[in-house]
Image (cartoon, rainbow, N blue to C red):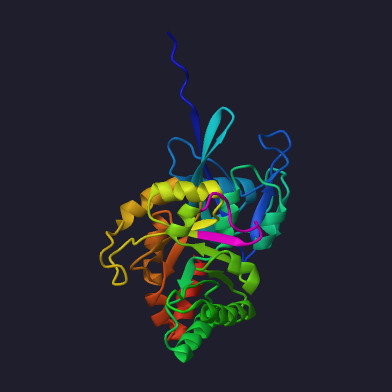
Amino acid sequence: MNQPAAEAIVHVAAAVIVDGAGRVLLARRAPHRHQGGLWEFPGGKVEPHETARIALARELYEEVGIVVESARPLIRLRHAYAGKTVLLDVWRVAAFRGVPHGREGQPVEWVAVDALLTREFPAANPPIITAARLPPVYLITPEPEDGDVFWSRLETALAAGVRLVQFRAKQLDAPTQRRFARRAIELCHVAGARLLLNAPPAWVDELGADGVHLTSARLRDLSERPLRRELWVAASCHTPDELRHARAIGVDFAVAGPVLPTASHPDAPPLGWSGLRDLTEAAAMPVYALGGMSPAAAPTAFAHGAQGIAAISSLWEAAADSVTLAARLRQLESS
């Protein structure tokens, strides 16, 4: 009896190419190609003898005429189309030589990162769009026990370039949480940053936040996405099952940890870098590494599939020296 043919897996290297203004380069697929007429992130098939990084450099030169000077992993995901599965190996390219242009006659265009939501892409691309819109650092606030220090550190972190904040104040009573959250939201919005509440999702619209961060317990209790698509939904995930549930209800990104031993959770067994890799490979969404993280650990987190790092104490302490923190954040954004 003939055995059914194994499903074809096509390995593709693609690039989120970012210019100095933070715009992303898009190309339009030729009408005769699969998914023709849709916009895409430039790239192409990885040949059997190539690594993804080598294929990326070759494809970007052939397609849009640029020479890649530096690139780092952004996200890897699989998507099943009829008759084949595509493994998308996506890299972030922020340094290159040459002027991008469609060498194969395809239209190319620089697009503001949030305007990616207005374009039509192949079905596999929504997690890539999300990854392109997210920064490499996710600041989680400590409990605001000393109000003056708390507001000073938050303002310094925002001035240094932090653009994604989780407001977490579980030890405060609900009225005080709301009052502190309103002020934190205002500070973030003035700085051009987004703030997610680690609180009941119903508070988001009430207070004007940008989204919600679900604890693993809140995540388990939900059977559908708690907020409309224009708002952000994040979740703390520690296992593949939690990631699968998060993906099923439409969570935008996850935080996984602890990756390394941490004083805040001394009894929690660390995932380690290999454990983080296992989760990011299974996630099909951006994942931040949490636990023992600092800006210095970000390159290792990138190499293991993470969007970047999420941290409390290391970023909060670093905010005491705004110049150094700003330099570290600029280095990560330009990588």
Q: Is residue 235 visible?
A: yes
Q: Position of residue 134 (x, y in %)?
A: 55, 63
Front residue of this view, candidates 166 and 180: 180
- Residue that sits furthest to the bottom in the current view: 148
Q: Where the N terminus falls, by quadrant?
A: top left
Which of the pair 278/258 is nearer the observer? 258
Kindly tell me whether residue 281 is visible in this rendering. Answer: no
Seen as rendered, the residue at the extreme top is 1
User: Which region is colored magenta?
Assistant: 222-234
Relative to 184, say whether 124 is above or below.
above
Residue 38 screen position, x and y as percent = 70, 43
State left or right for residue 277 relative to residue 190. left
Horizontal side of residue 162 vs 42, given as left or right = left
Image: 130 above or below 267? above
Residue 106, quarter of the rendered image: top right
Q: Which is nearer the eye, 25 or 213? A: 213
Q: Residue at x 66, y 52 (%)?
A: 26
Q: Position of residue 170 (x, y in %)?
A: 44, 74
Is 263 magenta? The answer is no
Predominant SS along the magenta part = loop
Give above or below for 23 relative to 150. Answer: above
Counting every numbered tag in the picture gives 0
The picture quadrant where one finds residue 45 is: top right
Residue at image x 43%, y 44%?
Answer: 51
Residue toward you, 116 or 235: 235
